[in-house]
Amino acid sequence: MAKNLVIVESPTKARSISKMLGRNYKVMATIGHLRDLPKSKFGVDIENNFEPQYIKVRGKAKTINELKKQADKADKVYLATDPDREGEAISWHLQYLLGLDPDEKNRVEFHEITKENVKEAIKSPRKIDQNLVDAQQARRVMDRIVGYKLSPLLWKRVKSGLSAGRVQSVALKLIVDRQKEIDDFIPEEYWSITAHHKYKGLRFDSEFYGRPNKRMKISNESGANKVLEKIDKDKFEIVEVKKTKKRRKPNKPYTTSTLQQDASNRLGFSTKYTMQLAQQLFEGIDLGGEGSVGLITYMRTDANRISQEIVDESLAYIKEKYGKDYASKGNTYGAKKKGSQDAHEAIRPTSIRRVPIEIRDYLTDQQYKLYKLIWERVVQSQMTDYQYQSTKLVLDNQGLIFNANGKITIFEGFYALSPNKENENILPEVEKSEVFGAEKIDKDQHFTKPPARYTEASLVKTLEEYGIGRPSTYSATINQIISRNYVELEGRSIYPTDLGKTVNQFLQENFDDFINIEFTASMEDKLDHIADGKSYWKDDLGSFYESFNKDMVEVKKDDKDYKVKDKILDEKCPKCGRNLAIKHGRNGKFVGCTGFPDCDYTRSIVKSTGIKCPKCNEGEIIEKVTKRGKRFYGCSTYPKCDFALWDPPTGETCPKCGSLLVHKKNRSTDEIKCSNCDYVKEKRR
């Protein structure tokens, strides 16, 4: 019989750890929270100093009873939930449910699921950190107050079934504000002039700058023509040659937010999916003969630091694979950044020796991509700088200045591991006073562009920069505003729906004192102070509630109508004969009967692209929305035909393979490319 009981949250983690600890340990999983605030009522006693009214989570009685039974038998109980505030609180609740001594050292943290780490952690249990628990309780109670007090107001004044949250409402505000910037943007015309040269066997371009030491803006075609009239295409004289050696340092190891950003930008993963994959890599992957082992460290962190052990492993690998010139002196990135909780290391491989390609067969395609991203980031962080020479040529033509910029690699450094995708631009070796011509000179019209809509990656970056929420909560925050139909995805871009704009208007007009960037960021600082033992959590809740409640009292006096109106259609319901209307639901707009709830007729709104399905040649491609709110394009005859695309088709076919071309747009590029092969018809930056 096992003498020791170890309790974790996940069954997968429980299986991995059980094999590492052996038969003297029984490892069980809570499968999430066992004790929490009730769902059916407010659950916070405001009059009794914000005392939470915790209850056992419905459906968890069997799990609790089995854990209690095993805990009573065990000589020692170890509480090994996740190593963060949430995990600390779950262990605290477990301690209460199992009747364990609050002063007993029974809390252990597994920052990586490897045999060495697990066994070492078991040797060093500690008491539960009440400060971390109180910080989690403060966040939980604060979010409960906002959610349960604001949501009924939204139901009454805007639309039933809505919700508001302390962090999600600020995220929505950012998205709505950005959309307003885009809507209000007035494009400005400008022109560029480019000279195309061939000199000393090399082709290169130079761009019109203006007069010496003064940039000239060309705002119309007339101005561009005046410049062209002054240019002698055969007389470009070199007036300055500037060569500069430059370096680029490798990026630091991943934090939660930078991993989410890179996985979105480079792999196309949502923040939610990235965290799901990272959880799998952390909890353990069966590597055959090696057994089940965690491949990465804990994935919720805002620190960049890594252990000296992993630095040494990385340096040894780099020297073996690439040579000593590619290995840096080693950097643990140990300096704590401002506002960082710094409870864990950065996200890193548990061993550099588990090279991605060598364990490829044990991973799914998506697990492999994410693990490779994490592994390469850490190894590159220990490599030498990328070195290159930047060359600038300044050319004079009749007193008009043109600039040509070039770049050549001197030493690839960390790019040896993952090649630099930036193109080199080689310029000819020239001296001052040399004169040569241009084969042709082009003028091009441009218009300034509005700021880009947020993507999941750029929204995460902005939230972190402002200190709003925590990296571990960003995925849930974004998922919440998508699932509530406050925002929608168009490709990777996030834009607010009419419902989202209305909800934001209501919140900003009535609760702008605390639904704003500054207040939300300051509350994160207060939660950090609680975690550090610098303030008492109920005192901070008291000051928050006093301000919040004043706004609640004022808004209840107001009777302004924010209701989202259904658009009545000139079409009758086929079931009851009443008018149909465009209604707003959790998953977007739909057509429904105005006689609801007496009549329940509904149908989805179909947006056709007018393009015939290339797979079945029967249906046409229509715009659809996944359950998660993500837009895609599929055949109208589904499930008979399962043809689908993530990007909007243009209707044109690829000259290489015959597949449909799609319009792919993100923050940095706008291109028309093949949905199947590498053909690119048009690309703009």
Image (cartoon, grey):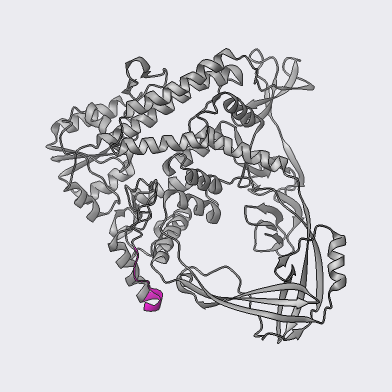
| 85 shown above or below 653 | above
Q: Toward which corner of the image does residue 593 lie, by quadrant? A: top right
Report whether 356 appears left or right of 175.
left
Instruction: Looking at the picture, tell me which residue is in the foreground, 564 or 331.
Output: 331
The residue that appears at 57% across and 19% down in the rendered structure is 155
For the N terminus, the image quarter is top left
**Could you tell me residue 520's position as x and y percent?**
47, 35
| 616 shown above or below 394 | above
The residue that appears at 42% across and 18% down in the rendered structure is 40
The residue that appears at 53% across and 55% down in the rendered structure is 267
Residue 638 visible (yes or no): no
Which residue range is magenta in the image? 320-331
Q: Toward which corner of the image does residue 459 lie, by quadrant? A: top right
Instruction: Looking at the picture, tell me which residue is in the foreground, 591 or 259.
Output: 259
**Could you tell me residue 17's position as x and y percent?**
26, 47
Instruction: Looking at the picture, tell me which residue is in the foreground, 580 or 311.
Output: 311
The residue that appears at 32% across and 72% down in the rendered structure is 316
**Could you tell me residue 524's position as x and y percent?**
41, 37
Residue at the outermost front position: 213
| 31 shown above or below 441 | above
Based on the picture, tell me whether residue 328 belongs to the magenta stretch: yes
Residue 154 visible (yes or no): yes
- Labels in figure, total: 0
For the C terminus, the image quarter is bottom right
Based on the picture, tell me whether residue 406 belongs to the magenta stretch: no
**Could you tell me residue 221's position as x and y percent?**
85, 60
